[in-house]
Amino acid sequence: MPKEKKTWYCDCQQFCDKTGQKKKKEVSRATFHNHAQYCEEGNTESALQTPEQEQEYIQNERNPPQAQHIPFNDVYKNTDPPPPIPLIPPPTPAMTNSPDNILESPALDDPRPGNGEDHEPGSGAPPNPLDDSEAEAYSRIEAVKIAQEFIHALRGASLENCDLDPNSLTALLNPADSGLEVDPDKERILLLCLRPYQIKSQTQHGYTATINALKLAWPNKEFFSYEQIQQRAHKLSGLHPIVHDMCSNSCLGFTGPFAECGAPRNNAQTGKPQLFYTLPVGPQVQAMWRDPEMAEGMRSFYTRAKEALTEYERTSQLKEFDDISCGKDILDAVQDQQITETTTLLMISLDGCQVYRNKTPDCWIYVWLVLNLPVDKCYKKKCIIYGAVIPGPNKPKNPDSFLFPGLHHIKAINKGGGLMVWDAPRNIIFVSTLFILFATADGPGMVYFNGMVGHTGKNGCQFWCGLIGHHKEGASTYFPALAKPENFAVIGCSHDNVPYTANFPVDPERYQHAVQLIEKARRCSPDI
């Protein structure tokens, strides 16, 4: 006799039967209940399967039907998607005081006395762990506390504490209102010295050797030393790096809450301080607008977004998606005036860099991409803005400390009213707001931006969509598999199959709720 197995079927035309042929589709229990509101006669369920049904079920599992193609333009239609499948459980009651429990956070609606600290018996429900009178109270978890301190430091950013020297700050607030012009007759020596200085593989020793050779040919001429040509290049470009001390082992940079750290600043081998350089993005954006050709390209993003909005208002769809400016969230921001013609859109990208061919990566770099430029230009090396170079020898343990100066610079500009920019083609000065649109990295590098567990964790999605992975028994690596393996019974990840058509929308409220629970956790392991 076959084993009883309850199955669920759905024939809603919204998601499961788009052809309208009244064909019932086998779905999970969660989908069965979520789609019930879209069915005219209600979904059906079966408590027993015959051997023939079992065989048909197995065949369907091996050769699943192809999902009907849905045009991407459907995202603009006013249809409400079904509620997401609740794969991540709601907050649970406080855990027992076992050594394995690193954190404990009581459920918000748990009425049991004793759940809160200093809770008197008979006084009603314990205090809500998210309701804290001290808004600036830091977490007891050291890693979370450090992140909170960096956030607090960013909120206090201003042009007065942005680490720019007086000359650089004056140039930032008063941009040049003319293009860069160098007289080839009067500045012939300057142009000659700039050419070897700009060679990508050039070193200080190589530049000095080149200048010495030129002096032999023209002993009566005065050429620029390396320090002199470096200063002239800074003056011409308006770009001066922000220099900070860092740990000699690349653990962290002495910025933000670590600025007053008493750790040794000098390298034990060389006796010199270990430094890392941040190139502020503001002067580089100003330089782009000083170039007439580049300035015209900076209008590409907003122009394409307005064209897409006009097309959608006229036809209720978009025929071509050729840029991120055609995305729904972007168009909503443009329509709501969150993104305007004067907004500078940035994308930050972080990754390790292998400087030497036969050595492992010993350097980290993050760059800025200006998304205002056309698609065929914004990813070119000429248009990429370097953010910072984090030298080795090791992988940074606290990337926030190295990202902090660049983010602090952007926050200070926006908080000060925006970036003053001279538009070369129009010969006008306007104020631009710096808008960080995307933060990108490879899989392992994304944890530095989103603070998640990583792509091999239980909730490995970088958007925290709710999909829980599976792991082998006794192993710690999770895999985001939709289908449950056969004969699989591992505690914590033995959930049923997840339909490949399931909807997992981003839920900021659930994310914020989980972050607050971690911040307000009352216990933590000494190892954290």
Image (cartoon, rainbow, N blue to C red):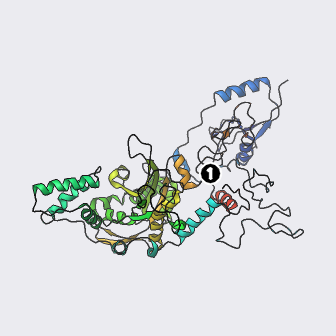
- The residue where tag 1 is placed is 464
Identify the secondary structure beneath mark 1: loop
**Pointer 1 local density, CA inside 10 Å: few below 14, some 14–19, many at least 20:** some
x, y percentage for residue 491? 75, 41
Is residue 101 among the parts visible in the rendering? yes
- Answer yes or no: is residue 370 visible: no
Total marks shown come to: 1
| Residue depicted at x 51% and y 58% | 252
Image quadrant in which the N terminus is located: top right
Please provide percent x and percent y for residue 522: 74, 62
Looking at the figure, which quarter contains the C terminus? bottom right
Along the horizontal axis of the image, is 188 left or right of 150?
A: left
x%, y% of residue 373?
37, 56
Whether residue 212 sits left or right of residue 359 in the image: it is left
Towards the viewer: 15 or 346: 346
Left or right relative to 449: residue 391: left
Residue closer to the observer: 326 or 163 = 163
Taking depth in this image into account, of 126 and 27 the one nearest to the observer is 126
Nearer-the-camera pick, 248 or 369: 248
Quarter location, residue 308: bottom left
Figure quadrant of residue 493:
top right
What is the residue that sits farthest to the right in this orientation? 122
Q: Percent from the top left, x then y, of residue 160? A: 44, 76
Q: Residue at 82% of width from left, 69% of height from top?
A: 118
Q: Amino acid at mark 1?
A: Trp
> Is residue 324 depicted above or below 13 in this figure?
below
